Image (tube, rainbow, N blue to C red):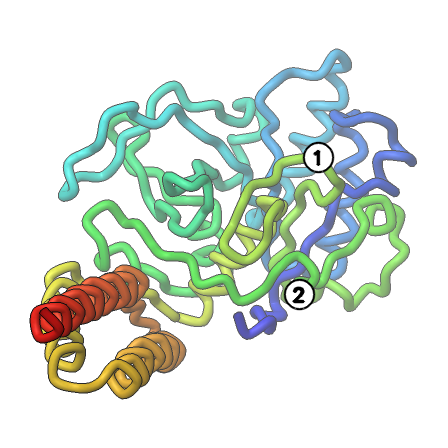
Amino acid sequence: MSHNPDDKIVVVGIDDASIQKYGIFPWDRKLYVPLIQNLENSGAKVIAFDIIFDTESKDKTSDTALANEFAKYKNIVLPSYGEMPSSPTKTNELVTARNFTRPLPIFAANTKTGHINRLADSDGKIRKSWLMINDGDKPMYSMAYTVSELYGNDASGYLNKHPQTQMYIKYDGNSEDFTTFSFAKVAEGEYSPETFKDKIVLIGFTGPGYDESITPVERNMKLVYVHANIISQLLSGEYIDYVSLWVIFLVSLLGIALVIFLAWKLNSTLSSMLTLGIMVLLALGQYFLFSGTGIFFDVVYIILALFVTYLVNVSIKAYRTMKEKEHITR
C-alpha cells in the first residue's frame, strides 16, 4: 500500500460518539436531513450512503422529510444488494443477482443506485469486486463505480478488462489513511464550510462491530473503507492483473529443472545457497513487477515447489552417497 489514497474521498462515520448521542441504530431519518444540507452547502461533489433505506419508518413524516431532501439534489447515491447465485456463473457471462433489497421507492426516485454485493475469496478476504452485475435482465453498476462516474471520472475501461467485470482491488489505504469525520459533528455543522468542497463523501459505519469484513490489509475493515479503496483505484486508473497459470507452470518447470541440476552437479553448500538465491530473486522479482506494473506474479507455489524439489533431490543424493560408501567399506 502507498497509504496515500485519493484525498478527494472522505468518510463520514457512524461512530461510537454518534451512537451515544443519537441512540442505538437505526435512527430517525430526520437526522440525515441536516447532514445532507451541511454537506451540500459545503460543496460536496458526490454523497454516497453505505446504508440501506429499505424499510418504512414508524413515523412516515421522517421518510417524507428525507425523500424531500434527496429530491433537491442530483449527486446522492444509495446502495442495494441482491442474492448471488449458489452455482458458478459461466466465465463469459455477467453474474445475475436475484431478490434485490432496494431503497424505498420514495428514496430511489431522486437518487442513483449501486450494488454493494461483496466478492470474497475462499479464505473470506475481499480481494475483488464486481463493477457490474445483472439485476434480473438489466445491468446494475456497483456503488463505487456509480460514484466514480457521478464524480465525472470515466472508468468504463475497467468493464472490458474481465468478462464478468471483476476488478482486483488495489488497497492503497487502511481505515486510518482515509480522512474520517464523525456523523454527529457533521450533522451539527461543527466543521468549516470548505471541508467537503468538491469531495466524494461516503457515509457508513465506523463503530466497532458494524458492517466489517476481512481484507488482505486489515483484519476487520469497515466496508465503507473497502468502497473508498475501490473508488480511489477507479479515480487513479490503476489496474491489477494476474500472470496466467500457464506462465506460472512454465516457470515452475524451468525452476525445478535448474534446482535438480544444481543439487546433483554441485556440493550441498553451494547448491543450497544458489537455490535460496533463486527463491529470493523470485520474491524480489514479484515485488518489483507488481509495484512497477500492477501485474501480480504468484511465486508462492513456485518457491514451495523449488524447496521441496531441492530437499528430495539432496536426500536422494545423500542416500546414494551413503550406500556407495557402505559398498566400498564392505
- Looking at the image, the residue that sits furthest to the top is 58
Q: Is residue 111 above or below residue 284?
A: above
Q: How many marks?
A: 2
Q: Is residue 71 above or below residue 250?
A: above
State how far apart marks 2 and 1 are (Cα).
20 Å
Identity, as a three-letter code, of the amino acid under mark 2: Asp
Of residues 153 and 164, which is closer to you in this image? 164
Image quadrant of residue 45? bottom right
Question: Residue 143 placed where, x, y %?
Answer: 47, 45
Label 2, secondary structure: give it: helix
Of residues 230 and 126, which is closer to you in this image? 126
Label 1, secondary structure: give it: loop
User: Where does the C terminus fall, quadrant-wise?
Assistant: bottom left
Residue 76 as seen in the image, left or right of residue 120:
right
Identity, as a three-letter code, of the amino acid under mark 1: Gly
Can you see residue 243?
A: no
Residue at image coords 52%, 59%:
229
Question: Residue 125 placed where, x, y %?
Answer: 46, 45
Q: Earlier in the sequence, mark 2 or mark 1?
A: 2
Residue 253 as seen in the image, left or right of residue 23:
left
Residue at image coords 50%, 62%:
171
Question: Residue 101 placed where, x, y %?
Answer: 48, 23
Q: Which residue is mark 1?
A: 209
Residue 174 as seen in the image, left or right of residue 89:
right
Question: Residue 126 placed where, x, y %?
Answer: 45, 47
Q: Which mark is residue 177?
A: 2
Can you see residue 13?
A: yes
Of residues 130 and 54, which is closer to you in this image? 130
